[in-house]
Image (cartoon, grey):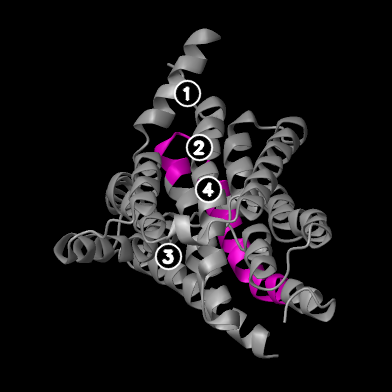
């Protein structure tokens, strides 16, 4: 019951901020221009600052566990390619494949994950390592699938397409933030207080701005037409990945804080940054928003159920 109430307290405020954005759009306080500008601001500024801050604050050398990091990277990779395979073979509209894939495998690991781990254990060392193992791949894989599956008439074919994809990875502001964050995390050279405070302030605006923009840009009628891929992605995101990889993690000996971090990585709802990237890379923002909303609502039940299961099995204390 305690875990359920905590889940509600973590997920519902996120959902309610989306509702506020939706309401403000309906009463005319926000418009399409706001959504466009806000999405661009998030994509190029606030989200890069957020991932940089999260990774720069990880003491990678002190806490590093190669086996755990490799497992997180492996599960993320398999989850991504499996979601892409499902999207390519079962979605009728090619335009939805990139959005479906990204929102199906990419979790809100940094925002919700750290909150859950800190609630249960009071520390987040393994949560931070989970971010190192998963978040860089989240962003690299997202750029790849959104580039290759997006509505990009100038992409070209063959070698030109590969070249453009690599350029998009190199130039992507969020990936630049990831790489810089890892470098700072490895150096363990604390940034000056002035710089650190500035980065933190900008990073703190990323999630609320993304949620407001997502809510303001949400198109209910169009989303209803995409209910089948939304349900499919939600089941994959919240249930299937966890059902496959949690037993594997247990068999490999992961327990306690490591197991909780793995559960969060696999079964947390789709991150709002999925919507920002989909919109800015010419993919289906409506489907992405629909999946983010659905997984956020359902996660309060499914994530609590996973925590209960692993606790009952003795895999966490």
Q: Which residue is mark 3?
A: 22
Residue lying furthest bottom in this view?
1
Q: Which quadrant would the C terminus be assigned to in this image?
A: bottom right
Q: Which residue is mark 2?
A: 140
Of marks 3 and 2, which one's residue comes earlier in the chain?
3
Is residue 129 shown left or right of residue 91?
A: left
Q: Position of residue 81 (x, y in %)?
A: 69, 36
CA distance separating discs 1 and 3: 33 Å
Determine whether label 2 and label 1 are within 8 Å by CB.
no
Of marks 1 and 4, which one's residue comes earlier in the chain?
1
Q: Which residue is mark 1?
A: 165
Secondary element at image label 3 = helix
Determine whether label 1 and label 4 are within 8 Å by CB.
no
- Which disc is residue 286 wearing? 4
Main SS of residues in magenta: helix
CA distance separating discs 3 and 2: 30 Å
Q: Which quadrant would the N terminus be assigned to in this image?
A: bottom right
Nearer-the-camera pick, 225 or 39: 39
Seen in the picture, residue 64 relative to 317 is either above or below; the reply is above
Q: Position of residue 28 (x, y in %)?
A: 30, 63
**Circle 1: is it few (<14), some (14-19), or many (20+) Cα within 10 Å?**
some
Secondary element at image label 1 = helix
Magenta range is: 277-304
Of marks 1 and 3, which one's residue comes earlier in the chain?
3
């Amino acid at each position: 019951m305690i875990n359920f109430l905590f889940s509600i307290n973590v997920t519902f405020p996120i959902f309610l901020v989306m509702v506020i954005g939706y309401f403000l759009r309906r009463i005319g306080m926000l418009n399409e221009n706001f959504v466009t500008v806000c999405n661009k601001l998030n994509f190029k500024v606030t989200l890069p600052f957020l991932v940089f801050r999260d990774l720069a604050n990880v003491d990678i050398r002190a806490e590093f566990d190669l086996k755990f990091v490799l497992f997180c990277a492996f599960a993320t990779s398999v989850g991504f390619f499996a979601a892409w395979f499902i999207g390519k073979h079962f979605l009728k509209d090619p335009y939805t494949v990139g959005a479906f894939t990204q929102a199906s495998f990419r979790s809100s690991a940094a925002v919700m994950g750290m909150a859950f781990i800190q609630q249960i254990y009071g520390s987040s060392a393994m949560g931070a390592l989970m971010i190192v193992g998963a978040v860089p791949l989240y962003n690299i894989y997202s750029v790849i699938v959104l580039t290759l599956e997006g509505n990009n008439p100038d992409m070209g074919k063959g070698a030109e397409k590969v070249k453009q994809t690599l350029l998009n990875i190199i130039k992507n502001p969020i990936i630049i933030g990831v790489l810089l964050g890892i470098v700072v995390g490895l150096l363990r050279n604390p940034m000056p207080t002035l710089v650190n405070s500035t980065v933190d302030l900008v990073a703190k605006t990323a999630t609320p701005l993304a949620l407001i923009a997502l809510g303001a840009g949400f198109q209910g009628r169009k989303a209803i037409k995409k209910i089948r891929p939304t349900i499919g992605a939600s089941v994959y995101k919240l249930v299937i990945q966890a059902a496959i990889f949690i037993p594997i993690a247990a068999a490999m000996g992961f327990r306690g804080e490591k197991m909780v971090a793995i559960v969060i990585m696999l079964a947390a709802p789709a991150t709002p940054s999925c919507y920002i990237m989909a919109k800015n890379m010419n993919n289906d923002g409506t489907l992405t928003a629909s999946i983010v909303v659905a997984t956020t609502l359902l996660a309060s039940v499914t994530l609590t159920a996973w925590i209960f299961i692993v606790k009952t099995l003795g895999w966490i204390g």
